[in-house]
Image (cartoon, rainbow, N blue to C red):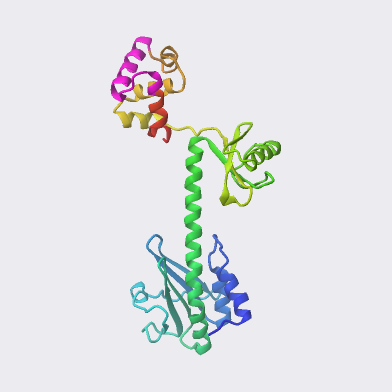
Amino acid sequence: MVLSRIDQDELLGALYALDDIQPFAAFLERLRRRTHAREAVLLTRSVTSGWKSHVSRISNATALPPVPRGLLQTLRSGRLYDFEELGEGGSGRIIRASNHRNDVWIGIRGGASDCFGAPDGALLSALSSHAAIAVSNMARLRDSQIELAAANAALDRAGVGWAVLDEYGEAVTGQNHDVSSRQRAALVNGVNDGARVAVAGQAIAIPFAAGGRGAALALFREPVQSIDRAAAFAAAYGLTGAESRMAIALAEGASIVEAAARLNLTEQTARHYSKRLYAATGARGQAELVRLVWTSVAALA
């Protein structure tokens, strides 16, 4: 069946709308009304997300019993099934579509006195491949959102903010920042002039082809989150908590005397800890100890 222009506009437009809050709700409601069904259902199963169920039913109607998942998995992809044929009782149609990411079932159901005709079944058959594509698109969107959230969390811990600047220096996406319009323009101009790294104020920019013509990726400092680097460094080198805190203080530029005062230690104890640090880490001086701190897992903690 070839979908009519009305069905394309009403059904496919809603099916492909990537709504994070109520995915497929508008599509199923339109499908239910279009077929005069009591319920319209979209069921999905993937290795990463497991089973998900989306249902639209007549207001105040009692929910119909769910179709057993074991039964759904026995259905052949691309074949239209009748609920009576499946021994589920009542009337309705269901079809399965599969791809490398998901299994998708789309169906319409009614009461015992309802009856769906051939056009309703043909409509489900025409929609099934579209439903599989739409579910895959939604899964890709969610994967991208998770990846972006993870990347932002990692940058937050390091105190790094970012923004993608267009060829005019306007931020098209990214985190909130206080880089002025003049600085953004200078960053983009530097990149457009061929600089591998452009600098303006407390921000840098590098070419960013994925952002489009003339785009630049701007990076700037933000307050580092309060984190426990000492615990990670202690675990990495078998140090006590006090010894590791001493290492962090030295890495942040304190002298042994200053570190002792900061950590409420005597100078003698601080010097003893510093000797233990060099022995445990293999560092041959404070400069190498600093390098070990900022290149170890402590910098990521």
Nearer to me, 106 or 291: 291
Q: Position of residue 170 (x, y in %)?
A: 67, 45
Residue 283 lies within the magenta run:
yes
Question: In this orientation, does residue 117 appear?
Answer: no
Q: Quadrant of residue 81?
A: bottom left
The correct choice, above or below, for 4 with respect to 48 in the image is: below
Q: Position of residue 184 (x, y in %)?
A: 66, 39
The correct choice, above or below, for 126 with respect to 158 in the image is: below
Q: Looking at the image, which residue is at 53% across and 81% down?
A: 37
Q: Position of residue 164 (x, y in %)?
A: 60, 46
Q: Which residues are magenta?
A: 266-289
Q: Looking at the image, which residue is at 50% across and 64% down?
A: 137
Nearer to me, 54 or 218: 218
Q: Is residue 211 left or right of residue 280?
A: right
Q: Quadrant of residue 31?
A: bottom right
Q: Looking at the image, which residue is at 36% across and 32% down?
A: 232
The correct choice, above or below, for 221 with respect to 165 in the image is: above
Q: How many marks?
A: 0
Q: Is residue 119 left or right of residue 94?
A: right
Q: Position of residue 296 (x, y in %)?
A: 38, 32
Label the magenta part by its dominant secondary structure: helix
Residue 226 lies within the magenta run:
no
Q: Looking at the image, which residue is at 40% across and 78% down?
A: 77
Q: Residue furthest front?
A: 194
Question: In this orientation, does residue 300 appear?
Answer: yes
Quarter of the image where the C terminus is located: top left
